[in-house]
Image (cartoon, rainbow, N blue to C red):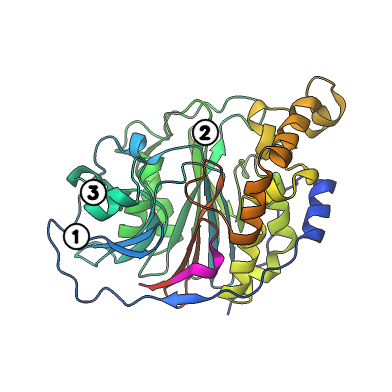
Amino acid sequence: MKQYMYTSPQVKVIEIVSRLVRVMVAVSAFAVTILSSCDKLEFSNGHSDIRKCSDMLYEVTYSDYSSEAPNGAYEEIAGDLACSSVRNGDFHGRNFDYFANQCPTVVVRTTAKEGRYATIGVARLKGTNEAKMESGLSKEKMDLLPWALFDGMNEKGLVVNANVVSKQDWGKKEDHTGTDKTLPELNVIVAIRPLLDYCANIGEALKYLQAHNITPLPSKKMNLHFMISDSDSTYVVEFIDNKIVAKPRYIMTNYHLLREDVDIPDYAIGVERYDILENNYALGGQSMQGMFDLMKMVRYTNLYKYPEYKWYSELVGPNQVSYTQIINEPEIKPLLDATLADIKTNWAEELKYIEKNGFRAETIWWDTTHNSIYDIRNKQLWVTVHEWYDKARKFSL
């Protein structure tokens, strides 16, 4: 098995986060329910019925779907995200952190077809809930679901996940409008689908992106960047100054990694989670369980459980204030202190529940809405939703 040693760019290490890492304890082993494969499904309109796997987790298989993204994809898929991803050895792990927690998670399979590989991935659509899932989604939502992937893997072992990246995390607005307007347009929000369908490895994935005009999210604050893995390596792909930039990296959170002209600012969103993943990186390459334990260390509710360690980029990063400002400037520190006090006092009972039982879907808080771990060698996917780590589910491609 190949070993992947990560070499980070020059990241300003935050002392308080290091203390957080030392107090966090690796989690215990988790029980996995192995689901039966979807080998006797009936298809209508190009897909099977949606099947419930567990609370807030569903599965559907497509034998056919549109070769182009349906209209309105951004409005149905996009939102503010705070995600983490890492690759080590055969394992590619990602946490999808989100706040609209009533939307169920869907494992989407697609069967192989001439010119397209078989795939498996994880999707969500805004405006859905369990009642709607079980009564049946509209044709429009079912047509969009294969395109609503936030991470996925194909039969060749190519894995792609998207994380949000701040357009302003370098102290200036990133003015990315498109990589080449003479080429066919592909918006980042739907790019995972064709990469998995048509690309067998990282080289082919990069060529596919270079053959399209990659346009950003229509958001003033956020865009997406990608982590792409195959059996041999992992690259981070970013869109900087209207150019595709791709380099080997094995950890990614929510700030640009590939700018070389400026230092990474200490308020970049996700620096705390990045530091934890870097400090504990070796754990993730040992086994599927090891990657599971590593990703659990950066689950989003740790922000609430350990507020005294001030995961400041998560709380005030969008305001573009530095840690030095938070500590020293009188008008800024009280804002953070008030946020922490609110978490500790007004949400005390909810915190006790989270500590004992994990997250609950009906609460309008951020959490790690789904955790995906891809075993590239064995073509398997393990999924946990809403930090219910004793309810992890295993799927095979």
Q: Where is residue 348 in the image (x, y as percent from the top left)?
A: 69, 45
Q: Which residue lies furthest to the front in this view?
A: 349
| Residue under numbered circle 3 | 137
Q: Nearer the viewer, residue 227 or 74?
A: 74
Q: How far apart are marks 2 and 1 (CA)?
A: 32 Å
Residue sitting at x 30%, y 76%: 37
Q: Residue furthest right?
A: 328
Q: What element carries label 2?
A: strand
Q: What span is in magenta? A: 388-393
Disc ID at residue 222: 2
- Disc 2 or 1, which lies upstream in sequence? 1
Residue sitting at x 62%, y 41%: 255
Q: How far apart are marks 3 and 2 (CA)?
A: 29 Å
Mark 1 Cα-neighbour bin, 10 Å: few <14, some 14–19, many ≥20 = many
- Disc 3 or 2, which lies upstream in sequence? 3
- Disc 1 or 3, which lies upstream in sequence? 1
**Up/down of 221 relative to 243, above or below:** above
Quadrant location of the C terminus in the rendered image = bottom left
Amino acid type of the residue that numbered disc 2 sits on in the rendered structure: Met
